[in-house]
Image (cartoon, coloured by chain):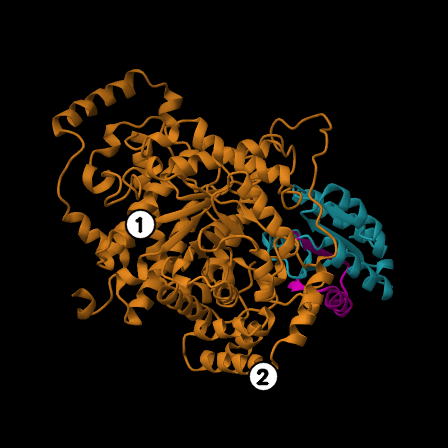
Amino acid sequence: MAEKMGKKKTTKEILQTKRANRKRTPMYHPKALKMLDKEFEQWRRSRLREEDRKNWFVTPRTVLGSEIPREMLYTPLHLRDSDYMEDIGLSGQGPFTRGIHTNMYRGREFTMRQLTGFGGPEETNQRIKFMLAHGATGINVLFDLPTIQMYDSDDPFSKGQIGMSGVAVDSVEDMELLFKDIPLDKVSVSLVTHYPSNTAILFPMYLALAERRGIPWNKLQGSVQNDITLEEVVRSGPEYIPPKDCFRIQCDNIEFIRQNVPLWNFVTYNGYNLREFGTSGVTEMAVALANAIETTEEMLRRRHDVDWAAERIAFFWSPASDFFEEVARLRAARRLWYKIMKYKFHAKNSRSMWMRCHTQTSGVSLRREEPLNNIIRAAFHALASVLGGVQSLHVDSFDEAYSVPTEEAALLSLRTQQIIQTETGITEVVDPLGGSFYVEALTNDIESRILDEVDEIERMGGYVTAIEKGWLHKKITEYFCKERKSIENGEIKLVGYNIHPSPMELPPINVFQYPEGVEERQKMRLATLRKQRNGEQVNSALNALEDACENGKNVMHYTVQCAKVGCTEGELFKVFKKAFGLWKPPTLW
Amino acid sequence: MESRIKVLLSKLGLDVHNRGLITVAKELRDAGMEVVYIGNSFPREIVATAIQEDVDIVGVSSLGGAHLTLGSELMEAAKKEGLQEHMAFVIGGVFPPADAEKLRVVGFDKVFVPGASREDIISSIHQLVSVKTKRSV
């Protein structure tokens, strides 16, 4: 109603009015709280040392931390206004604070989805099979730099970078080799297509492959990222298309995939890479949620039903070193997403209100010095993720400050997950930290901080505007420059680096060496493709795509046709650049 | 008389990770240097810009694995133009330990690995530039 009457309410304003209307299942009897107030005050006066009283609040200083002050002791007094069913509740129902599934890991283990990608499709295919043979339960494919940046392997820009940091994929032919002997209708595949643009280009190659193999698209399961934040903010590249066009492609992809590949997760709002670039856990989530809100609004504007558009949304987070903050953050984001979907968008299907998520342990938190220490760091990040109730997980390898992981290091990461899953017993109880005075208070605090930042973005004119204005770029730069100072001056302590450094020369670790000959192989395969494909079909598919870009038709309908007739990635990106023009991102410093 | 150091900074090739280089750019500027930051660029372009801007030192960053191929190409292009005589070249990023030595062999005056401190970077630049340009900086 308010929306019709004038100024549109922000998400925060909408949620605030709902808070006033909640039903009451208070956590504590007022009389008990009153007694506790007295007891606490007495304890504070008689037991607490002067310096503890003075330093009651301490702010943990950690890599990628949010600098949220912590009290020395948490009690029911911190939850005096909490309402059990509204704030904490039961698992598998709103507000989902305790988990999206009723029985959580008892019913379904978290998916062990280790990132894989290096060299040509043949090498990565071997590594995928190696991981599956050792008990991995999902596939997570990372593409090489030219593929991510949308240049073909024979483009002069790609020279010397083929198969680096990921696998080279130029056309459907490479997709075929990448998934050789892998049953696409049985395994869940995450394609780490960071950007809307490369999602629009690469996912159709996967669809074309399925079609070749006679697998109907409605049997395919997995996810793409498809996130404007990655293309326009986190990325550093030679050429960018404008944010509004990038956002449109993001929405086109969502629409097409939802319509044609019903089990596929069409968007993974990626906080991870943003946070790793340099931002707090609060901003990470606020930005992803602001993007999700704006995208959902666009889907409504395109006349889709909210439950249709939201059912398969996924999120991707970076758990760093502040252990309880990480657990609380996941719980807070689950509750906040529930409220947004329920109260702002009036979703009816509870699946639309699920904050389903994947986490990858924080890479920036790892150090080059004494690399074996990274095994411990990643294990704590992973533990926080599982205690926070994630759906799938990747554990970084200890050697990643040197190169992509060796087979040995990749296996150790998978083993870390398997040990948490099978040897610690923590998966037997749902949300084991729920009800902790500390964790609940921190969950409340973080939720309200995230909502404040969502509000800031909305008041600025929305998320795409925040990108265009450079607000986010600036915020990130300020964050990571400040963090670097804090590490250098020792405020943030890192064992083996700026505290307790080893006086001894430690033995070197094995470091991965990239396979040779990948560049030549990719170029030869491209030359063969360009010779053998039907030139007329290629041209007409590319022309149709250009027309779709310029006339507001859903681009993915046309990129699918391009993939089928053997167009290459670079050829499609050229069409985008021609149709949309180039954008210069704001200076970062 | 002391003169201001002019630095050219570039991401090497298609590498997407720019947090480190932006940090360095800011720190060098704050330390009084003139910084030309060109984002992602390729060896020949980098050399052409270095000549055009007449910089004292060129710093490139690579975390994506292309440090040897593009790094060597950059140094070859620099040698062809005779830049190494009076211009310093440094590289930073993520690479295997053995590659740091290889990068020095192809001609980089200094190789920075993750963990290089602000002080270390600034003092190395001062030293390199004063040696290369034979002026006090």
Q: Residue furthest top?
A: A46
Instruction: Between residue A42 and residue B4, name the one nearer to us.
Output: A42
Amino acid type at mark 2: Glu
Q: Label 1, on which residue?
A: A354
Q: Is residue A87 left or right of residue A424?
A: left
* Rendered position, A53 above or below A144: above
Which label is found at residue A191? none
Q: Nearer the viewer, mark 1 or mark 2?
A: 2
Which label is found at residue A536? 2
- On the question of residue A574 being in view, the answer is yes
Q: Residue at x 78, y 68 (%)?
A: B51
Q: Is residue A507 left or right of residue A180?
A: right
Q: Residue furthest front?
A: A214
Find chain B in the image and tell me its colour.
Answer: cyan
Q: Residue at x 46, y 41 (%)?
A: A319
**Percent position (x, y) of residue A139?**
50, 49
Q: Which residues are magenta?
A: B37-64
Chain orange in the figure, letter: A
Q: Quadrant of the N terminus of chain A?
A: bottom left
Query: Residue B48 in magenta?
Result: yes
Q: Element at badge 1?
A: loop
**Percent position (x, y) of residue A541?**
52, 79
Write down the quadrant of residue A446 in the picture.
top left
